[in-house]
Each structure stands twice: as C-alpha cells, then as structure tokens.
Amino acid sequence: VAVVTGGLGPTEDDLTAEVAAAAAGVPLVFDPAALAQVEAFFKRRNREMTYSNRKQAMFPEGAVRLDNPVGTAPGFMLKIGRCSFFCLPGVPVEMKRMLADHVLPACARLQGSDRAVLRVRTVSTFGYGESVAGEMLAGFDDAFPDLKLGFRAKFPEVQIKIYGHHREEAPLEARMGEALEWILSRVGEKTFSARGDSMQKVVGDLLREKGATLAIAESCTGGLISDWVTDVPGSSDYFVFSAVAYANRVKEKILGVSAETLETYGAVHEQTAREMARGVRRIAGATYGLATTGIAGPGGGTAEKPVGTVCIGLATPEGEQSRRYFFPFPTRLMNKQIFAMTALNMLRRELAGK
Amino acid sequence: VAVVTGGLGPTEDDLTAEVAAAAAGVPLVFDPAALAQVEAFFKRRNREMTYSNRKQAMFPEGAVRLDNPVGTAPGFMLKIGRCSFFCLPGVPVEMKRMLADHVLPACARLQGSDRAVLRVRTVSTFGYGESVAGEMLAGFDDAFPDLKLGFRAKFPEVQIKIYGHHREEAPLEARMGEALEWILSRVGEKTFSARGDSMQKVVGDLLREKGATLAIAESCTGGLISDWVTDVPGSSDYFVFSAVAYANRVKEKILGVSAETLETYGAVHEQTAREMARGVRRIAGATYGLATTGIAGPGGGTAEKPVGTVCIGLATPEGEQSRRYFFPFPTRLMNKQIFAMTALNMLRRELAGK
C-alpha cells in the first residue's frame, strides 16, 4: 500500500491523477458521480462551482473513487502491479478523515489474520533538551527489547513515544503500561501528560476539575497563551479574560500596575509580573491570574535583561508568586513559545499542588 | 547535491551519521574540534553537556564538518560517488542558516559559469479558494510560456508563485515584473501583498506609515489576532493593547458593551462587535479598534448563528463599522484562523483607503 497526498485540487499544478494514469499506462476518464459530489459540496456551502472543479472528477481508468465528505476533492485508489496507491487530498483534515475511512480498513483487509496490533503511547514532557531526555531514558532498549523508544522535539515540548506491536492486544497493553511506568519513574518531574495531551488541555482539565477560572495578562507573549488556551474546545468554561498589554501605560491604567513599580523596576521584572497577575485576576474576577513580561527580541535586550529574559507572575486565592527565567533561543517566535509554555507550566504545577 | 535534514541529535534514534557512513562504506570517526564546539555552545548558555552530546562529534570518515552557529548539532558533507550529501540539522532555524552558509555556496561553485539565475515571486492573496485563483489566472501559461505558475494554499491565504530562471538577471527581473503586473490585473482585489508578506506585516507597515496605533478586542479568535500582530518584530511601535473577552460580563465590564446590547442581540452580533471595537479603542487610547465575536465551534452553534459565524467590528477616528460573515470550515482552529484573517483584512482595507 502506498499513500500519496496532495495534487488533487482544481488548479493546473494539481497533477496527481494525470501522473498516476501515466504510471499505470491508462487514460483519464470522467466520473459523473464524482462531479455530482463536488457540485453538491459547493451547493451546500452556497458557493458557485467553477469550471476547473470539473477537473476533480477525472480519474485514471480502473481507479476506485474515494469519497471526501469534508472537502471538494475526491480521492482515488489505483492498483498498479501488486501495489494499491491511495491518492488522498493534502489538506490535513481531509486527508486524516479519508485515511480513517478508506486506507486503514483496506490495510486491515490486506493483513487479514496475520494482522498485528500496533500501539503508540506518547508522553508529553517539558523543561529540558532532547539530549537530556535520551540520557535519562538510557537503558530502555535493554529493559524493553520488544518495544521501541522514540523522541520528537515539538518545540518547546519534547514528546517521548513508545511504539509496540504484538499479535494480541492484552499483553501488548500490559507491556506498554510497564514501559510507561518505567519512563515516568525517570522523567516524571518533566512530564505534564502521560497520554500526549497538550499543555493547554492539561491546564484546562485541571481548572475545570477545580471549578476554577483563569485570567491572563500577557506582554511579551502577545496573546499566544490565550490563543493556545482557547484552542481547546469548551475553554469558555474556565477562561474568562486576557489582557495583552504591550504599552506601559496600559499595564498601569488597565492592569493597575503601580507607576512606582514601573519606574523603579521597569516593565520586565518579577514585581511587575506579580502586579500584572494580581491586576488581571482582580479585574476579571477570576480564581487565577497568570502574567508574562519579557523580551522576545530581536530588539529590546540590554546587558542586564538580554533577549530571552521573561518574568512570570501567578496570582492565586492564597497570594502571588513570580519568577525570572532566561532562555537562549535564537528567534522571536521561539521565545514567545517557550515563555508561553513556561507560564502555563507554572500554573499547571500550582493546580496540581506541586 | 543531495540535502538531508534531521537525525543529527544526541538521542538513540538520531542515525544520520551512522547511516551515511554505512552507505559510503566507511567507519565513524571522532572529531575533537566538533566536540569542542558542542561544549562551547553549552557553556555559552550555562547548560551542562551530557554524555550523549559526544555522539554529535562522530562523523563518517572523509566527511567535511559543517559548523552550526545556532545550535548544538554540527552537520557534515560527505561525497559518495559523484554526489555531495549535505547532512543538516532538522530544526528549521538551524537548517536554514546552514543551507545559506554551506549548501548554496557549494551549489554555486558546482554550477560555475553554467549558472542560471533562479527567481521566485510570491503574491499573497486572501478571500477565495485555490480553484477560483486558478480560473482567474487561466491563460498565464500561454502569455508566459517561459515562466511557471504555482499555487500554495497556506490556509487561510492562497499564495500565487511565479518561478523563473534565465542566464541573466536583468531580463529575468523584467519578465517577472511583467508577469506580476499580469497577475495583479486579475487578482489585485484579492491581493494583500505583492511580495509575499504576511497579513500582519502588511497591516503593521500601514499602521506605522500613518503613525497610528491599534487595540484589539477578541472573543472567538481568543488571542490569535494579537499573537499574529506581535509576531512581527517592532510591533510595539503600533500595537498597544488587546482584550480577549470570552465572558459576557467581561465584554460589559471591561469593554463597556452595553447590557442592553448583549441582552437584545446576544454576544455574536454586529452591534456587539461595534461596541467592543469602540470600547477597546477608547480604553487603550488607540487610533483603531478591531473586534471579533463569533462561534468557532465545535459547540455553541444555533440555527440562526451556526458554527462558522463571526461578526467583525472596526472603530476608527471617523466612526464605526461592522459586518457579519459565515465560513464553512470543519474545525475550530480553521475557524479561528479565517476569522482572524478576515478581521485583519478589514483593517487593512480601511488603512489602504479601500
């Protein structure tokens, strides 16, 4: 089985069907049912179909059309020799749906009774490099020669993956559970999800469990924390308000940071972060207030506060805390990401009672 | 020349050097100078080097080490037969830097006097599908048989690309300028940058030109607009404040949306968007106020206001405007993106006097 993605669209550089037909040595043929589907898709969305969408109904002779319930481009399966080529759209959401609907069932049929169970477990960790993760887990291959360990740097988190396959599900699940325990005993301190959840999902679940709400004051992260938090469906249950306060006068006027603090310590300081967290918690009437202020770069750094410096403040019903960090990453976007992740992690540890 | 990326890290699944050595039939050898570089990198950042980083100083015999000034993993070039394999780190910022430092100069040397000039021009467009873009530009291949046209759907924008190559720079530039004019005469209305800039860069440049400032009130976009705007270095010149107001009481209390409006029209309405824009402009003391309120899904939709509905408000020194849109995309994240882009595009058109 070969899976091909992309090139099924209506424009002139979409050539998958043409190339597949040439490879198989067959002509392209028009499929009226496919055209009807494309037409129906446009009709449902009140958009007009253009002539070039007709191109999406041309398939190599002998191909089996694969319906696309979430987009305009149907895919197709074409057998060339002993290989089944599944040609799917490149748009991730469409590709994933069609992989599940068409390709995976076909693979299962092909494997028949030889089929092995495959499982992947993902552990989401944060706060160290991939190399340290590798060192901490040295010995895995000896302890679990039947499983495979992988690392994925999904900046700023490091995902640890356990891959396993076995003829039967129950012993595989048990074995992978053992491996998971082994891993957590070594990197538990750095782990924020033992099932691959995102930091914002973990924080959101903890807030919901406690019936607590969150307000955020962002300076250097510029809205990224809020964007992440609200990527989680249902986040309106606990996310109340966020203030992205770039200008000092906004920190003062809206968040209530004292003019004295700004004058004495500057915008990037633990005291400022603390007052931002306190202020946003108060004006939003939230259980927790989380704040960031720092220097994402490329400009704005000084000898005392270089690019990569961030102060994070957290206000809780019990009081306030804040901390300064320095990160050595080379771009503004990486700094925004590591600052945002560090802030959410501080909140997560507080919520988890660590 | 072949370029290989990734697999140069310190963990056990980083196998590029090993595989390259096996392919070339040579052993791996230890490079003390490379180790010194890795050590220096860690020292500059006050981090401790772990034993496994030593792995990064092992290269196939005969390989030329390629220094990595922005990360821990040096790359290498290994000639196998007539092909030069450039093995670079997978981290994009490191890969790009080393591509520029090492690979491109090597390519130029290889091409010598046979070298052709290659150019790509990118036009950033928004507000229609890839298929419509293709139709509007039908005829390009006949008008410019010496150039190549490409499309890239970088949701929610559609990038149009012109590829050209020629032995000399001046005639190529002139020809690509003609092609650009031809394209703009057909999709100018949908174009927000004729040089491939992002929407947030274009909006930021227009604000800076006018000496104007921006405040944003986000509901359904949850901070994404602010995050995009602040991805641009120097955005503190014009970006003042953003309020991510999920809860109705926050819209009322902080942004000053009237209780009557919220009761009569609900949170998702043109009138609410208008008052949010007016409110955030006022409290931040900004030239422009931009607001979004809508339903990103998956929950929260109604027959009257289905998932995909958004109202965008814009407050300017001259007054306020607002508009309702409906988009048919299948995920929460796509909705956040198209809502954010539509809002910035409304501001862009206002700033450009359209």
Image (cartoon, coloured by chain):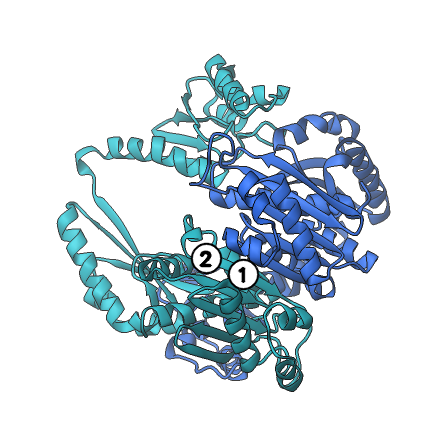
Chain colours: A cyan, B blue
Is residue B85 visible from the viewing direction of this image?
yes
Q: Is A179 on the left-hand or right-hand side of B316? A: left
Secondary structure of residue under mark 2:
strand
Q: Residue shown at 65%/68% (left/top)?
A: A250
Q: Position of residue B262 (x, y in %)?
A: 55, 45
Q: Residue tagged by mark 2?
A: A239
CA gap, disc 1 to disc 2?
Answer: 8 Å
- Is disc 1 in contact with disc 2, using a CB cutoff of under 8 Å? yes
How busy is the neighbourhood of tag 2: few (under 14 within 10 Å), some, or many (20 plus)?
many
Q: Give, as a three-letter code, the residue at label 2.
A: Phe
Q: Give, as a three-letter code, the residue at label 1.
A: Ser
Q: Residue shown at 50%/84% (left/top)?
A: B46
Q: Residue shown at 51%/72% (left/top)?
A: A277
Q: Residue tagged by mark 1?
A: A242
Compared to A156, does B126 lie above or below?
A: above
Q: Position of residue B48 (x, y in %)?
A: 44, 83
Q: Position of residue A17 (x, y in %)?
A: 51, 26
Is residue B105 visible from the viewing direction of this image?
no
Q: Chain of mark 2?
A: A
Which quadrant, please, contains the C terminus of chain A? bottom left
Q: Chain of mark 1?
A: A
